[in-house]
Image (tube, rainbow, N blue to C red):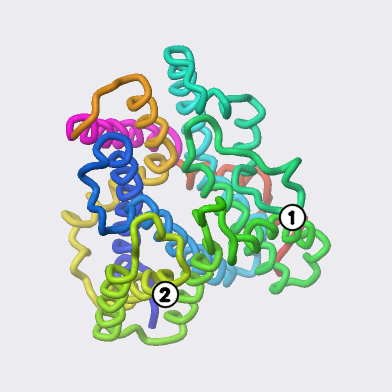
Amino acid sequence: MFNLARSKNDTSVMLDLLRATAAQMVCVGHALSFFASNLRPTSLPYMQNVGVLLFFLISGFLITYTLVERSKAPNYSFGHFFIERFARIYSGLIPALVLIAIIDGAVVALTGDPTVLRFYTFKTMVANIFMLEGYQGVFPDIFQWSAFGSASPLWTLGIEWQIYLFVGALFFMARNLRSAPFLIPIAVFFGQTPIHFLFGAFQVDGVGKGLFALWLGGSLIYLALRSSTPNFTLGMIVGIGGIAGFVMTAHPGAEYNFKLYPFLAAVFFGLVAATQSTHLLASSKIERPIRFFADYSFSLYLVHHTIMYAFWTISSVRGMGAFAGSVIVSNIVAIVLANIGEKNHRKMAKSLTARMLSHDRDPVVASR
């Protein structure tokens, strides 16, 4: 049966590899756009957009796994889920926002860049702390904000956070109807953005279209696999077919397209199903470097664009040297930042749970 234990198969390590790969795709794709656009293959999709799509598939899969598996404990509640998600996101976000503020401040002081200056405000930073940069609800004049400064990738983080709270609220209401008075307001407010992203986009050109639909695709893949016996041969066939279909169908700049999502879902399904019966990645020589790159992938996603935009704005150097240098510097900075924040998310969650949920029980919404 389906299992994510590292001692049982390669699936958990593969998910780390996929997460690290998606982060590097976003980083390298943006570096190409900034410094070496002539090197980007004109017939292939933008890798930074594909990386974002992969993140949402992975997220849907893992969050559903977390909800289903951890709720087997009778006292696991919405409060526990919220603290875990809060710690995972904010342990990386807060250090990243501090660094972004410093770098953008230097850019504004040196160049007066109007693009950064427009969104480099205290109110915008506060709005980003409250995850309002991706809001697409019925109160746009109040809650709709842009990403802070040059950190444009933050728009997906706001969407992700609101999906967490919406799905979590629905899940725990279904589990315990007595929690409805507390969770209905959460579901109503935070559900506006996910519902928009079932079929809508973040921009008029289609960027972000259907991201919640893709997230739900990842969720359905988990639910399908946990109730069946994954088959290596079937997984390989489905995965290879998904890759072929995506490559033949995708066009540069049109990655946010419902026609492509089934192919990406097929690739993801194939990888998960196939690795359920393999141990090729179990060696510490392979697993350790994969985990190393995965452990700072979130920080890399958050700060790389700001670092590259600063290079691009302050310096006129372009080409392979600037491209490689920006990728290397972004990775080094993300590694340092992750050691400050992201890698400590479990400690943060444990501390918050101990302080806020005494005796491992949510005083507001008990899941029993």
Please identify the dominant SS of the magenta region.
helix
Question: Residue at the location (51% across, 53% down)?
Answer: 205
363, 54: nearer the viewer: 54
Name above or below for residue 96 compared with residue 136: above
Position of residue 150 measured from the top left corner of the image (x, y, whole percent) = 48, 32
Position of residue 65 measured from the top left corner of the image (x, y, whole percent) = 49, 68
Name above or below for residue 23 compared with residue 312: below
Q: Is residue 319 left or right of residue 165?
A: left
View extreme (top): residue: 109
> In what element is the residue under mark 2?
helix
Q: Which residue is mark 2?
A: 262
Q: Which residue is mark 1?
A: 189
Name above or below for residue 214 compared with residue 221: above
Going from the N terminus, do you reach mark 1 or mark 2 first? 1
Where is the C terminus found, in terms of image quarters?
A: bottom right
Position of residue 23 measured from the top left corner of the image (x, y, whole percent) = 35, 49
> In what element is the residue under mark 1?
helix
Task: Say if residue 259 shows up in the picture.
Answer: yes
Position of residue 182 measured from the top left corner of the image (x, y, whole percent) = 79, 59
Estimate how packed mark 2 is, as few (under 14), some (14 to 19) or many (20 or more) residues with alpha carbons within 10 Å: some
